[in-house]
Image: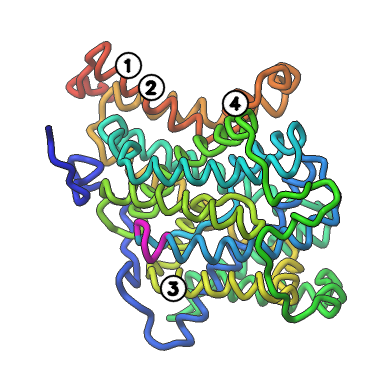
Amino acid sequence: MRKYDPEALVFEKTESAGIKPHIRIDERPKGIWQTVLYALQVTVVDFTPFIWVAMFVSISGLPDTVLPIMISTSFLAMGVGTLIQTIWGNRLPIVQGPSTSVLTAMGTVTASFGFSAMWGAVIVGGILEFFLGISRLVGAIRKFIPPVVTGSVVAAIGFVATKIAVTWIFTNPNALNLSLALLGFLVALILKFKGKGVLSHGFILFATVIVGVVLASAVGAFDWERVHAAPWFSIPKLFPFKDMADYGPKPLTIGLAAVIGGFVGYIGSILESVGDYAATTAVSDEDYKVKHINRGIAAEGAGCVAAGVLGGLPLTSYTQNAGVIAATGIASRFVTQIAAVFFLLYGLSPKLAVLLSAIPRSVLGGVFLITANLIMFSGIDMILSETRSLKNNMIAGITLGTSVMVPFYAETGGAAFVATLGPFMRMFMGSNIFIAVFVGIFMNLLLTYVLKVGNNNKEKEK
């Protein structure tokens, strides 16, 4: 039996996105102020728990009174999960945050089985994910995900990130918000290409503050009343929802159907994370190793258990952070750990959380649009680093095409059909990244191992 080697490469040869970071994973910025600046920048881009919490509450049919507490607890969970990942897990500069895959599944579980059963599904699902990681099972699939597959997944992640950016831009598409989005985009570009030193590397934060706080305040688009009304400090509680009238006498209940329904979301999250790790190593100019997958998934599971105990939503790796690294060149793990501390502070201080949440989404969308597309092209670079052949073109083309268009169909013309499907298939049809991973692996298996197509059939140039 072949001995397990955690340092083995996921790919036979190291693939790079062609991006050289300014500060590498094991390095630190010069000075505390630069560290704080870059860490704050990370939190601004990854500051989305309130969006996902609102989405979860809507899906599950819970009262809006749940929102403020769950926003704070999700920030606490982000801080804890990110520290677990960067200190004990795969030690990549990855931010852990609420997972759209898992929260969608958990929303359905809550609507069907109740709030108490959902927390049981969160914690049991986290434990199962943890054991999948330490069992090394997930890392064993690496031979089925060559660079052309992972590059396709990374490119699909770029499409998802772009969708997030565009959604933020058009959240409330009036003339003011669209103007702020455009200004955010232009100021970010100017700072990135014309700024020097910290201004260039910290362009996301500077552009967000200049446009999202200063200019937005001047035109009345920044809600300072909410900021003033929020308290400075709040002590967290374990199982904070156990005293709700409809929650029940126990902090959680465990039901088989609820656990199965919730773990469907965990499967999607795991597949997405495998792609996110590839994207992060690519933009950080690091080798993608087996240990990154196994330790990363185990750390995510541990983070999800902690999130359930704290009352936050389950966690996954955040795609946005790969875009931040690609755009800024700041790949420092230490910066990500300081960002985790800030997330903890946001969770402990409602006022700080409300301050950042008051920044118009359109501004963040305009700024994030730059980083999102850098993720996309880092994936394309990985695809092109492979041998150019009809086989690889077919794998990448079908993977990208289906991962983009199937969810589009599911949201538009196929919405009525998708509504008739079970929870798993509804999640599958709506997840670009889940589809990209599944189709990419399937196409590689079909062409490589079933049809035995080689890479010697290079496409003739026209």
In the picture, measured across the screen, residue 36 lies left or right of residue 395, that is right
In the picture, measured across the screen, residue 258 lies left or right of residue 189, that is right
- The quadrant of the rendering that contains the N terminus is top left
Eye-nearest disc, 3 or 4? 4
Q: Which residue is rendered at x = 35% and y = 78% of the image?
A: 28
Q: Is residue 138 magenta?
A: no
Across and down, in percent, residue 137 comes to 32, 36
Q: Nearer the viewer, residue 461 or 48?
A: 48
Image: magenta residue range? 85-90
Q: Which residue is rendered at x = 26% and y = 22% of the image?
A: 459
State if disc 4 and disc 1 touch (CB < 8 Å).
no
State if disc 3 and disc 1 touch (CB < 8 Å).
no
Upstream in the sequence, badge 1 or badge 4? 4
The answer for how far apart the CA atoms under marks 1 and 3 are is 42 Å
Q: Looking at the rendered structure, which numbered label has been put on residue 424?
A: 4
The answer for how far apart the CA atoms under marks 1 and 4 are is 23 Å
Upstream in the sequence, badge 3 or badge 4? 3
